[in-house]
Image: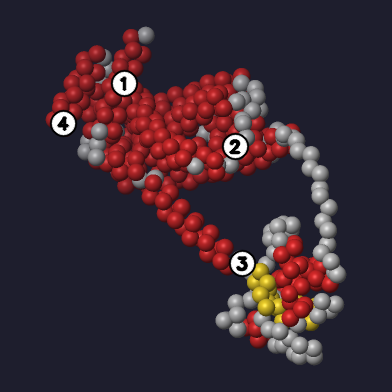
Amino acid sequence: MTGLREKLRAALVVARRDFVAVVFSKTFIFFLIGPAFPVVVGGLAGNIGAKVQQNVERPTIGLAMSASDSQRMLAARDELEGRMAGGIPQLIVLQDVGSGEDFDAKAALADGNRQVTAVVGGTLDAPTLTAPAERARQWVGLVSNLAARARAPSPTAYPDVRVQEVTTSLAKVKTGQIYTAQAAQVLLFLLTMLLAGMVLSNLVEEKGNKIIEVLAAAIPMDAMFMGKLFAMLAVSLVGIAVWGTVIGAILLMGAKSLPAVSTPAVGWPLFLILGFLYFAMAYLLMGSLFLSIGGMAATVREVQTLSMPVSMFQLMIFFFSSYALTIPGTWVEWLSIGFPVSSPYAMLARAAKEPEVWPHLAALGWQVLWVIVIVRAGAQLFRRNVMKSGPARGKSSVSLLAKLFRRREDNAY
């Protein structure tokens, strides 16, 4: 029991030291505002792309018919506006074509000043559509409908449709919960991918300035690893709190334009709690893997080289969990739940789809067990590669380490 208490004390000392060193550093401000740059750039690019797409996909059909036929076609278009899905292309009069007069539709399409996608000629009884192949197949029915309404002696009467609305349907609820599960998985992956690398960067820095050897000589290795993990988890939660506050304020200002999000099966309060717990587990699992990589590497360059396979492994885990979401009830889903690194993603998606709570308690216990296993294995690897002798234990080593960190903090301030 005394040994466990000493490990917890040492882990808390390391966690406090790392947390203070990161949060009160100048680079932490840039870490907080760093995600804003891709969001701003992505928003600007999306806005510009939407405007370009809108201008590109605004088709116009030119009319090369007699004056009376063109006016009737324009009136028919106004009559159908808003009644057809996807809208109706704009109609413009290119030329008043008299009886027996020919019009070169191909030349009109090739004329850059006219900017028309298709040309309708002929008469209302026998219209002619000149357009590219894909547009011709798309608009032949529309032109026929417009010509039929233009020929009618009086406007066509459209019957009023009696609508019976329902609140929702079971299929719609299930579909919405699947979308909620997918969004939760993506958010969990992005946060873990963005934040778990801090553990490795912190270890790389301390490998370079030899602080890690002082830590390894003063306290048990698994206590050092656990302290670093919880320190970086606390730093990540600070970052998430700041980002969440800013994003929440922005969303509240535009709350009326936000799409409705389906309520998860376990309810929003429990879903948010489970989201926090599964993020912590996903972060600790990936962070312990990063620390284990740091223990296997002898140099900083090796640490950076080995981190790439783990990042790709994390990406594959996300794809695997997303694929398991599409085939529920199969062995693939159960494998994603049982595999420790993918378990947080799979169980968070399950919380959005299934109302049972007890499987989450079992899954969280399973994930905690694997965090302990990976941390202990990583500590053994690190001790074997960095410290050839066992680390010092006892109250004196922890007290010495605390004094050393306190002195460094005083000098920093």
Horizontal relation, residue 144 to residue 395: left or right: right
Where residue 167 appears, as percent x and y from the top left, is 72, 34
Disc 3 designates what residue?
Answer: 58
* Disc 2 residue type (three-letter): Val
**Up-down relation of residue 344 to residue 89 (above or below):** above
- Residue at image point 46% right, 52% down: 43
Circles 3, 4 touching at the beta carbon (< 8 Å): no
How far apart are the two marked residues, 3 and 1, measured between alpha carbons? 62 Å
Query: Upstream in the sequence, badge 2 or badge 4?
Result: 2
Residue 158 or residue 179, whichever sits in front: 158
Residue pictured at 67% horizontal, 41% vertical: 326
- Is 213 left, or right, of 320 in this rendering? left
Is the residue under label 4 in contact with that under label 1 (CB below 8 Å)? no
Q: Is residue 136 visible?
A: no
- Residue sitting at x 48%, y 60%: 48
User: Looking at the image, is mark 3 or mark 2 earlier in the sequence?
Assistant: 3
Residue farthest toward the top in the current orientation of the protein: 1
The residue carrying mark 4 is: 413
Name the front one of labels 3 and 2: 3
301 left or right, relative to 345: left
Q: Which numbered circle lies on residue 261?
A: 2
Q: Earlier in the sequence, mark 3 or mark 1?
A: 1
Distance (Cα) linking label 3 and label 2: 31 Å
